[in-house]
Image (cartoon, helix red, strand yellow):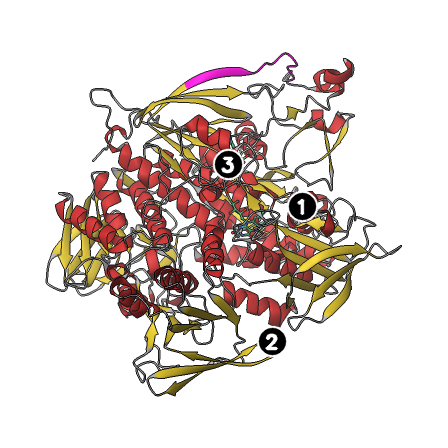
């Protein structure tokens, strides 16, 4: 239950979120969707953060802006989220449940209430300024918008560059603004807010490589930063996605990436690893090759830190399919080649030979670092920063700051990638929800939607909106020609093009036109329905139409992107795709979305640290929890771990969690049993356990964990001095090494090789933790670590340094020449090829310690079958969307966390568990849920009960009823249409994908262009 200490005072049901990056936005959406009022304070003129500058993202290649843009609109238009841009917090007083926050908002000089976002002011502004968003590679105006999809889409005036503010003349924007929105008299204003909890997500800044003149940034124009390269790759960037070098705008062939610029540098810059640079460089090299096949990318690196899910395979793909060359070398200086603009990189081969190599362009993979005001920021909120200026947290409470009621999300807690940031966004939401559970719903308002217009008797009046998607579509498809083509098709009442159909101003325009022209169907021709359909559906619903009277014609993924360079043919294809969509739209029917009640309880499968954390978080919010653990005891793998890398007592922590679980009145523990069967659907599951216990619940969290790989190599179980790291850790708890002992640790045992070609993520940390323990107990004992890459990402880099300082010796090995372990009586001998010495070395050892990999728990597969979940090639559960829905499954109401998702350490598992609980709470906090109307309809009259549908349905919606015949549960149906496709009797039809609609689309494709549908 609520942990608000302020007895007697009513807590506030509002939260303050500082920072509008992807971490802050996820937290905002989860909080607002589960009954809390959110105030978001954002320093920039728009929300979006770092992600707004990125092109595509690793390892999926998803377009960053395409993922971000719907989120911007979702956050921006959420009734229970107030966004205060150009604002900062200057004071915080109070306690959990009751904080008073002072906010200072700087003037925009444009009135957001009046501005329509038409952009005329920007177009006509005579003052050109170098664009910070384009990283100095492009131009903006003195009145501008941070980026085209910015939210809010109200422009702002840059006072320092505005001719009126500087010279008291011009006022062109004011004269031209049709809405009278320009307000040169605006001033800074201070105001106060009362909130129950505070979430900090200010993100990080990027290292400025000017500080390292030897790398040539700022001196040689063809040396650029990785952020500049993101903009160069971007279709909406300074060169429209063409890879050119800034010096002379020539197409470069040889491009070099220099890794760790401003990271892992204990002497000149930041000591930590920035966690994302190895992968973003790989991504940039791959995308550069996709844009221009002549590019020859080389990545100069020290350690390839591909430690995330599917990352190693991505690097292999980059090497094997995209010819990305990875060169293990440190670049100490970049020189320019006279008159060519080329750059000469000097590096030493591993054997010491010096090489000079010339490149056309150099990209510096700059690291991430706290904002320069990080100290002041921490002191405003009264929280402790760590020694580097990140928010100080503990591995057991990764989103709690030192001040109760104030939480941290995203990169401000330590460098991380998008999915980890999104995960933490949901995790902090889970924490804040637990704190404020008692005041949920006290400060929120309910959206009043206009009554739905009855269009049954009307002839179709279709509005068609064709999106440029910047130049994503427009550079391949001739948009004006397409608009011209569709505008005279019968039933089309309006057609026009939009620069970004998903931006706020476009949404407003669509709504306005629906009302003004009486449109009763809308087609948007743009990107993928996967990310954007819900946004447009909501827009037309707000305009009074049933949301299913919408169709999305995908002319980006299915046209522009796959026909780059074929403008004429792509334009013809786009016309056809849109004509098909119009033909279908004319036949769209309004659908009803069913409402189902929610059982306010959850099932958590797996009683390891992740499962226990999720269970406690949910129970603290007042939801009932059934925690099911296969073993007799709770605790999972962590029960056998003694210490964390920062020397905290893990077993004590696990014990206290177990005690909390057992003493929590909201949690029922089912030990020694597993799930036998399940029935039901989101909000209403029924589960039967192997001991026959039955219960109902609204959500499921799968936390089935993993297990340690039992090695068969390196004489394990043949020689009693060959141990695993776990066994060594146990020994070190009770014994000290002898002064003369020699330990040889071998990394990547059972990891990073087919058929388990993934990094187990924790083995490097484990080896370093145990080697530090050996050296601290017995400094004369020797430790050798034989490794492929040391992956101490983020702030863990400190421990790598500590191990080196304590005298641990690191020797790299190649996977093609693995170490050999030889028994020498009681002792052992290890032969390994040292690439630095370019010869074999032999190390006598008292102990060989194997850093063994992680495998999914065998019961994960069983649970996946019961709940119809998908696992990846390595047996780990597959999330709904790698970037944006990292703890959700495609099946609604089911969430995941911990090792069942992928290898991760305790801290990351705890974050993910809090996130899964946060996501589950969003649904459990509702009394009823609305389920999609796009479901299959079953016709009992024509059904022969042949059972084909029953066998094929992934979601278990067809079932055998009491008459022994097939019936269909529309609530569990996900509308995938497999039943409709396979049913020999045509007894299934998917709403709005009915045969007549599909046939009309086919006709529109095959028929000559003229004529109606
Ligand atoms: C070159 C590069 C490439 C990358 N590529 C990838 C990739 O391909 N895949 C991937 O997963 N990750 C990638 N990343 C990492 C990814 O960008 C981050 O993980 C993610 O954007 C971090 O989100 P965040 O919300 O923590 O912070 P941010 O995005 O930095 O957002 C924080 C926001 O808070 C605002 N703010 C700061 N201080 C204050 C304050 N005092 N008051 C109010 N607001 C404040 C900031 O202006 C900012 O808008 C890349 C990073 C870089 C630099």
Q: Is residue 586 visible?
A: no
430 or 471, which is in the foreground? 430
Q: CA distance from mark 1 to mark 2?
A: 32 Å
The segment highlighted magenta reads 182-192
| Residue, disc 1 | 209
Question: Quick one: label 1, few (<14), some, or many (20+) residues within 10 Å?
Answer: many
Quadrant of residue 561 within the rendered picture: bottom right
Q: Mark 1: is the Cβ under 8 angstroms from ligand 1?
A: no
- Which of discs 3 and 2 lies nearer the camera? The answer is 2
Label 3 packing within 10 angstroms: few (<14), some (14-19), many (20+): some
State the image quarter where residue 435 is shown: top left
Give how far across and how far down residue 923 sits, in percent. 30, 42
Would residue 479 be found to the left or right of residue 900 on screen? right
Q: Which residue is mark 2?
A: 837
Q: Are marks 1 and 3 in contact (CB under 8 Å)?
A: no
Residue at screen point 65% across, 67% down: 327
What residue appears at the point 66 percent right and 57 percent down from the top-left corner?
258
Mark 1 or mark 2, whichever is nearer to me:
2
Query: Does residue 900 appear left or right of residue 967 in this picture?
Result: right
* Residue with the mark numbered 3: 73
How far separated are the C-alphas under marks 3 and 2? 57 Å
The numbered mark, 1 or 2, whose residue comes first in the sequence reads 1
Q: Nearer the viewer, mark 1 or mark 3?
A: 1
Residue positioned most to the left: 692
Front residue (pair 852, 138): 852
**Most prominent secondary structure in the magenta stretch?**
loop
Residue at mark 3: C-beta within 8 A of ligand 1: no
Q: Residue at x 74, y 47 (%)?
A: 239
């Amino acid at each position: 239950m609520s942990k608000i200490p302020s007895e007697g005072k009513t807590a506030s049901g509002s939260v303050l979120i500082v920072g509008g990056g992807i971490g802050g936005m996820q937290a905002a959406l989860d909080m607002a969707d589960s009954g809390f009022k959110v105030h978001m304070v954002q320093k920039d003129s728009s929300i979006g953060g770092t992600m707004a500058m990125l092109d595509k993202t690793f390892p999926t290649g998803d377009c960053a802006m395409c993922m971000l843009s719907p989120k911007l609109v979702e956050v921006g238009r959420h009734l229970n989220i107030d966004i205060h841009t150009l604002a900062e917090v200057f004071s915080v007083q109070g306690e959990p449940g009751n904080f008073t926050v002072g906010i200072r908002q700087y003037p925009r000089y444009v009135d957001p209430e009046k501005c329509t976002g038409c952009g005329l002011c920007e177009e006509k502004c005579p003052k050109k300024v170098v664009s910070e968003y384009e990283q100095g590679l492009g131009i903006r105006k003195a009145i501008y918008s941070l980026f085209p999809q910015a939210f809010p889409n109200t422009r702002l005036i840059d006072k320092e560059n505005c001719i009126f503010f500087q010279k008291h003349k011009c006022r062109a924007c004011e004269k031209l603004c049709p809405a009278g929105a320009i307000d040169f008299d605006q001033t800074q204003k201070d105001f106060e807010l009362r909130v129950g909890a505070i979430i900090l997500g200010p993100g990080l800044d990027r290292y400025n490589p000017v500080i390292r003149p030897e790398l040539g940034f700022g001196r040689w124009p063809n040396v650029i930063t990785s952020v500049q390269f993101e903009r160069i790759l971007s279709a909406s960037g300074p060169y429209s996605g063409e890879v050119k070098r800034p010096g002379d705008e020539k197409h470069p062939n040889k491009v070099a990436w220099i890794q760790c610029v401003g990271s892992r540098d204990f002497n000149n810059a930041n000591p930590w690893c920035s966690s994302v640079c190895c992968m973003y460089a790989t991504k940039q090299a791959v995308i550069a090759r996709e844009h221009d096949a002549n590019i020859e990318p080389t990545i100069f690196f020290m350690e390839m830190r591909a430690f995330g899910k599917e990352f190693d395979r991505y690097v292999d793909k980059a090497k094997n399919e995209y010819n990305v060359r990875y060169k293990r070398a440190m670049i100490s200086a970049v020189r320019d080649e006279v008159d060519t603009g080329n750059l000469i990189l000097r590096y030493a081969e591993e054997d010491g030979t010096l090489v000079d190599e010339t490149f056309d362009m150099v990209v510096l993979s700059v690291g991430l670092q706290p904002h320069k005001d990080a100290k002041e920021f921490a002191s405003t909120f009264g929280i402790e920063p760590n020694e580097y200026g990140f928010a100080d947290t503990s591995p057991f409470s990764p989103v709690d700051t030192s001040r109760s009621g104030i939480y941290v999300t995203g990169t401000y807690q330590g460098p991380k990638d998008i999915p980890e940031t999104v995960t933490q966004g949901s995790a902090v939401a889970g924490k804040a929800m637990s704190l404020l559970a008692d005041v949920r719903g006290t400060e929120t308002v309910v959206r009043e939607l206009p009554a739905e217009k009855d269009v049954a008797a009307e002839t179709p009046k279709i509005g068609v909106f064709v999106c440029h998607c910047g130049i994503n579509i427009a550079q391949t498809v001739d948009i004006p020609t397409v608009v011209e083509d569709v505008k005279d098709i019968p039933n089309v009442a309006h057609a026009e093009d939009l620069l970004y159909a998903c931006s706020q101003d476009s949404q407003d325009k669509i709504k306005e036109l629906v009302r003004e022209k009486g449109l009763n169907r809308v087609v948007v021709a743009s990107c993928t329905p996967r990310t954007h359909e819900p946004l447009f559906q909501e827009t037309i619903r707000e305009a009074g139409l049933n949301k299913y009277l919408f169709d999305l014609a995908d002319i980006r993924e299915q046209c522009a992107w796959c026909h780059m360079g074929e403008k004429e043919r792509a334009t013809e294809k786009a016309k056809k795709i849109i004509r098909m969509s119009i033909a279908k739209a004319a036949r769209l029917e309004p659908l009803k979305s069913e409402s189902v009640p929610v059982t306010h309880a959850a099932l958590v499968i797996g009683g390891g640290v992740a499962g226990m954390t999720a269970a406690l978080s949910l129970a603290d919010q007042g939801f009932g929890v059934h925690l099911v653990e296969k073993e007799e005891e709770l605790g999972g793998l962590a029960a056998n771990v003694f210490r964390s890398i920062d020397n905290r007592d893990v077993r004590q922590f696990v014990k206290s969690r177990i005690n909390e679980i057992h003493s929590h009145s909201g949690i029922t523990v089912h030990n020694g049993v597993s799930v036998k069967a399940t029935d039901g659907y989101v909000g209403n599951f029924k589960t039967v356990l192997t001991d026959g216990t039955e219960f109902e619940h609204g959500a499921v969290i799968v936390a089935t964990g993993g297990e340690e790989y039992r090695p068969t190599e390196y004489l394990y179980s043949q020689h009693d001095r060959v141990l695993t790291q776990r066994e060594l850790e146990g020994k070190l708890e009770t014994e000290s090494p002898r002064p003369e002992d020699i330990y040889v640790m071998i990394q990547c045992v059972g990891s990073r090789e087919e058929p388990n070609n993934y990094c187990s993520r924790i083995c490097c940390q484990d080896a370093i933790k145990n080697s530090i323990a050996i050296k601290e107990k017995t400094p004369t004992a020797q430790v050798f670590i034989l490794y492929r890459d040391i992956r101490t990402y983020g702030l863990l880099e400190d421990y790598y340094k500590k191990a080196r300082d304590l005298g641990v010796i690191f020797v790299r090995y190649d996977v093609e020449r693995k170490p050999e372990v030889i028994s020498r009586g009681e002792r052992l001998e290890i032969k390994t090829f040292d690439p630095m010495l370019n010869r074999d070395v032999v190390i006598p050892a008292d102990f060989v310690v194997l850093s063994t990999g992680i495998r999914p728990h065998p019961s994960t597969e069983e649970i996946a079958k019961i709940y119809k979940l998908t696992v990846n090639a390595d047996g780990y559960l597959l999330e709904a969307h790698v970037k944006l829905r990292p703890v959700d499954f495609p099946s609604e109401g089911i969430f995941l966390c911990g090792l069942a998702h992928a290898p991760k350490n305790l801290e990351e598992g705890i974050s993910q568990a809090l996130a899964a609980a946060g996501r589950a709470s969003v649904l459990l906090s509702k009394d009823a849920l609305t389920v999609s109307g796009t479901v299959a309809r079953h016709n009992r009259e024509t059904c022969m009960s042949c059972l084909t549908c029953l066998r094929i349905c992934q979601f278990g919606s067809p079932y055998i009823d009491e008459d022994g015949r097939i019936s269909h549960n529309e609530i569990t149906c996900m509308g995938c249409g497999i039943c409709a496709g396979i049913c020999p009797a045509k007894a299934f039809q998917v709403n709005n994908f009915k045969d007549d609609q599909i046939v009309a689309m086919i006709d529109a494709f095959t028929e000559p262009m003229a004529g109606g549908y």
